[in-house]
Amino acid sequence: MIRKSNLFFLLFFITHFLTSQVINVKGKVFNKLDEELSNIAVMVYGGGKLLSYAYTNEKGGFLITIQKPKLDTLNIVASSLGFKKESKRVSVLKNTININFILEEQNDILEEVVLESWEKIKVKKDTIVYKVSAFKDGSENVVEDLLKNIPGIEIDLNGSIKVNGKAINKLLIEGDDLFDDKYKLLTKNLDASIIKEVEVLTGFEDNPVLKSFQESEKVALNLKLKNNKKNVWFGNIDLGTGTGKRYNTTVNIGLLKKKIKIFNLTNVNSISKTAVSQVKNTETISLNGFDTNKKIEKVSNELISIDNLSSSNFSNNEDVFNNSLLNSLSFVTNLSKQTKLRSLTYFTYDEIEKENDNITQYFIEPKTIFFTEQNKIDIKDILFSTELELKYLSKNETYFTYNFTFENNPTKTTGNLIFNNDNVSQLQEDKKYNFFNHLNFTKKISNNTLLLTYTYLGVNNTKQNYSIQPNTFSDVFNNDEDLTIYQKNNTPLTYYGLNSELVTKTNKAEYGIEFSAAVDRDEIIGSFRFENQLKIDSLSNNIDYINKRVSLTGKYTYDISKLLKISSSLSISKNYIKLNSNKNQFFFVNPKISLHSKKTKVGNFGISYSFQNNLPNSKFLTNSFMLNNYRTFNKGINSIQQSNNHSFGFYYTFNNYKKQFLINSFFTHSFSNKSYGLNSFISENASFNQYTVINGAKFTNYNLSITRYLKSISSSLKLNTQQSWSNNPVIINAVTSKVVNYNANYRLQGTTYFRLPINFKFGIQYNYSKGEFNKQNSTNNYLESNLTANLKISNKWLFKIENNYYSIKSQNYWFSNLNIGFNPEKSKFSYRITANNLSNITKFNDIVLSSFQRNETNYKVIPRYFMLNIKYVF
């Protein structure tokens, strides 16, 4: 038996022997500003082999323990994309090696760094971290350019962001929300070079009380900045001037501190980047049973529109000639530990010019109707908005948010056209304002019970003045064609309401009861007259539409197993309708049910069914015809009728962010018993449309996207298809028939991340459509593709050429843009030369076929121009 003293001696000897056989390498990593750097890879090499490695922590420190090698020296290397690699050789005479590194920033060349998956992407529970330097190619100017490079993140043509098919709920900066649903202000203007990491937050919840109560299905993005951009004022000035009166200048100023974050973003340009498009609301989707971030925001009717001149084919608004100004100021600050204040104020000004030639044919009985248009539209659009949001979290687990927004938007649109060889002038002047208020209250009554209350108030108005010269309806009214037509519309809207929900959960179930009450008052006041004459009563409208409704909704969710969950709701509502002096009541019962899986290794799926009763919008209820444009009158129906809609859905998603293998698919099918359609009379000179209740419509939509990062070829590929089927009855020139349409597109796109000086982005898409009306069939198809090559000759020089190709009805178009960047080392200045539309295409012919209509439109396109940009970063 071993004595205690001998046992102690034996343990001491073993411990001493083992510790003498290991070496501890420790130290810190700094930049040249003596700032500590986190997430820097520190590697220990011996005899040409990698022995071990570690990442620096938040304070820049690292500790690596290795078995003592039979070598005299070791090579310690610190490296990270964004910094120059530094190597130090050290002796192994001691068991502890202390060593520090000071790294110098640089623009990385991908071919100089071996990228492994763990260096590019980190998955930490519900957070996926993308190291930006592993996905950028050096040509990115703004954050949007950067996000487009990251697999699984999609940005559509209007700037909205999705992650594997799901719209993001927020875009955060260092964990704070500064722009809410106006995040395009940030993505389209903020300098991309200041971003270090992009985080995808898959279980995001902004409400801390709700976060502690349930799991969230929302998605958010969080942008993390480089360390040298924190706690100091930073920004850039990018001045651009070019030929053909083209210019593009951006100014960014920012400050990010723990207690306050500020951004001022300014842009002026004439390169088709309109200002108002950057502040249009970005829709978000919530799959939760309740959402404390929801906003009920409605806008009043806009019944006149003479701007219909844009092509959906252009990804960069190549047909828009503009002079635009945007300035936005946003900040968020902590007033106390419990209180946070956010503000966003912006001003936009756009002068927009668009031109096209259009040929329209209607394939209807008894003969085909044909007319031509040569359009020119000039728009002056001003928008001012200010938004304040206050958030307060009390110590007794109560959370308040109050949001206030005011918008003022005057617009003047001038239209000059030649219609069948006759000159027509149109003038549309709009004055719009919107006033929104939102108050959310969340109270955790107990660990299993939650109370949510939301109240809202909106006051909106749109005034439209419209004139046409000459009188394009002289044949209809049998009067002088030299008369000017005048129409005035005033559409005030006031709405307010309350939603309150009590939620209780058990081990496997969740119960909810929601009460809501709302009032909408929607008015349409319109007058029509000819020059120097009184208004025509039979063509004037005075609609006062009031909808008061109360509803009670029961909700039930049950965990069938560890993998399956069933969710259901039943809503009972009563609507009290007043249309001028007529009163009606409607009683609705709307059920919903869904079965969906929880997070599994093989993906997630769900099936759903819902039944929804609907009432018409006020624009369907006008009692007289009202002008929509120079050749079209619209009229509503005489009585209110409810319609209902059945909707079925299925979805499947698979997310392996570590390997970047993502699948997103959904299928929806809906049909209604009846719907509001048009009874139209169309002639060569005019169209008269009257809304009517017709047999119900059917709609089916299918979407599939597969994203895969292929490590073997260092590329990300995405395959996507979208297909839709619709069946809608219409009445045209007394002929009732179904309009059957099928639309499909198939797209393959990819991005390479080669360890070479050259990388590519590519895509090819085939579009197909088919229509049927009154036993007539029409088809249309066209091909589009794009190829972008980035050639990085050195740290200083970058060449980028972008090509977009369209093949439409045997007509081929090839748009090419060239970008040359020069970035001197250790300089705050950089330079960029841009050549747009090198092939100098000035006209783009687009053909759109529907079941009974053919439109051939020739768009005027911005001709070739060159631009020089000088950028200063501070």
Image (spheres, helix red, strand yellow):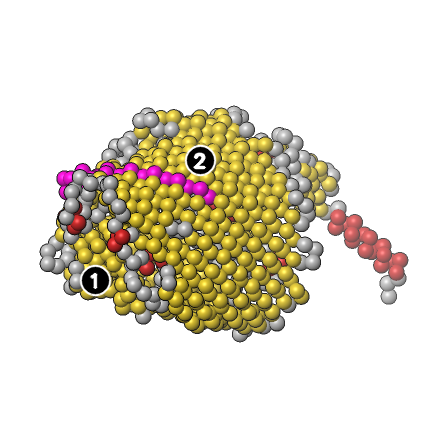
Q: In the figure, is residue 262 to the left or right of 145?
A: right
Secondary element at tag 2: strand
Residue found farthest to the bottom: 560
Q: What label does residue 557 carry, if any?
A: none
Left or right: 335, with 750 as reference point: right
Disc 1 secondary structure class:
strand
Mark 1 or 2, closer to the camera: 1
Tell me if residue 796 comes above or below residue 150 in the rendering. Answer: above
Q: Is residue 529 left or right of residue 198?
A: left
Q: Is residue 507 above or below residue 285?
A: below
Q: Is residue 448 above or below residue 254?
A: below
Going by the numbered disc 1, the residue's amino acid type is Ile
Most foreground residue, 287 or 44? 287
**Image quadrant for the C terminus?**
top right
- Dominant SS in magenta: strand
Answer left or right for 616 relative to 115: left
Q: Is residue 268 something that shows in the picture?
A: yes
Q: Amino acid at mark 2?
A: Leu
Task: From the top left corner, tell me how far across and down residue 177 is, in percent.
Answer: 55, 46
Number of marks drawn: 2
| Residue at position x 55%, y 69% in the image | 513
State if disc 2 and disc 1 touch (CB < 8 Å).
Answer: no
Mark seen at residue 731: 1
Residue 71 in picture, x, y percent from top left:
66, 40
Distance from Cα at disc 1 to Cα at disc 2? 45 Å
The magenta segment:
407-425
Q: Residue 560, position in %: x, y?
A: 53, 74
Please tell me which residue lies in front, 529 or 599: 529
The mark nearer the N terminus, 1 or 2, is: 2
Task: Sort mark 2 into few (<14), some (14-19) or many (20+) by Cα contacts within 10 Å.
Answer: many
**Circle 2 is placed at which residue position?**
326
